[in-house]
Amino acid sequence: MKNQQEFLAMIEDYLERDVFPGVNFAILEGEEVSEYLFGKAALIPEPIALTPGKKWDLASLTKVIGTGTAVIDLVLAGKLELDAPLQKYYAKFTDSTVSLRQLLTHTSGIDPYIPNRDKLGFFELTEAINQIRVTDDKSFKYTDINFILLGFLLEEYYDESLDYIFNKNIFKNWEMKQTSFGSVENAVPTSQNIPLGTVHDPKAQVLKNHCGSAGLFSTLSDMILFSQAYFREDKYLELLKNYADGAKERSLAWDLPAENNDWLLHTGYTGTFILINPRIKKAVVFLSNLVHLKDNREKWIEERDRLIKFLINHLSLD
């Protein structure tokens, strides 16, 4: 990548300013893969070295690594209708107007508020999501509920839990042997109040291996394999266009961060992101433990977007 040293200097600056304690990332350019490891796995209560092969809480990258790719594969194979109502495939959902396209592009109109959500068990939370309120506002509004519902659809379609579905249809095919739902061993710590190797996301803590929005852990090596699979399989070129009915352009499951729609992007709350251009076969996998020290969401979005903009600009030039 052009100006790679400038990007590495940005990472060093982020570490010095405690934006995150540690980071493991890879830059893929065709068959060339450059891997980087900086910082610490943890700083509190005592510094812990960050070593290769650690498992990271992917947070919302679950939406594309698992749920999104599984649904996209069915849509592209003609097995699911993009504009069919969710009810056609998942009858327990009480609204008949929400389509798969709307769920995949976050234009469903779903109001994600669930009273006393953090006090609900598995069955109560599942039922609340099945009966979630749907509004007439179909503008882009990102919410986990869209992908939890898509996860429920997959479980209904395959009559299996998401962990089995992801393993059989994605991870085994792409030799991603270190990717799974938590709890896991050899994990990088997230928030200090979360047990090591336990998922950070509160809904995923309850729904466990039935959660389509968060919950997966993975290594940098497995995420590289995922990116390379998107390079190999020409069908994913179909994602490089807008699928949303609205002002905000979105692909299926993925954001479209560049003007020409050649890049696919997804981010995760814990400090992760994946950026893929399947046309020119370039990608960046970025895994950090952002939430270990603090949870300054607005500041991180600003810092993260600066990295993403730099990467798109310089990888596109090569």
Image (tube, rainbow, N blue to C red):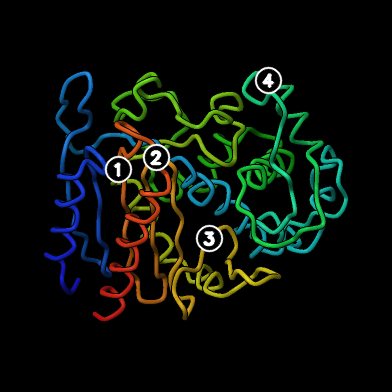
For residue 53, side relative to residue 242 (left or right): left
Which mark is on residue 1? Answer: none
Q: Which residue is mark 1?
A: 288
Residue beneath the point at 11% across and 64% down: 5
The mark lying in front, picked from 4 and 3, is: 4
Which mark is on residue 254? Answer: 3
Residue beneath the point at 45% across and 34% down: 180
Give amino acid for label 1. Ser
For residue 113, side relative to residue 209 (left or right): right
Residue beneath the point at 66% across and 26% down: 117
CA gap, disc 4 to disc 1?
30 Å
Q: Which residue is mark 2?
A: 270
For residue 286, side relative to residue 91 (left or right): left
Question: Is disc 3 surrounded by few (<14), some (14 to 19) or many (20+) residues within 10 Å?
Answer: many
Percent position (x, y) of residue 97? Answer: 85, 55
Rendered position, 274 above or below 159: below
The reply to whether discs 1 and 2 touch (Cβ–Cβ < 8 Å) is yes
Give amino acid for label 3. Trp
Earlier in the chain: of badge 2 and badge 3, it is 3
CA gap, disc 1 to disc 3?
20 Å
- Which element is circle 2 on? loop
Give amino acid for label 2. Thr
CA gap, disc 4 to disc 2?
23 Å
Q: Which residue is mark 4?
A: 120
Earlier in the chain: of badge 4 and badge 1, it is 4
Question: Is disc 2 surrounded by few (<14), some (14 to 19) or many (20+) residues within 10 Å?
Answer: many
CA gap, disc 4 to disc 3?
30 Å
Earlier in the chain: of badge 4 and badge 2, it is 4
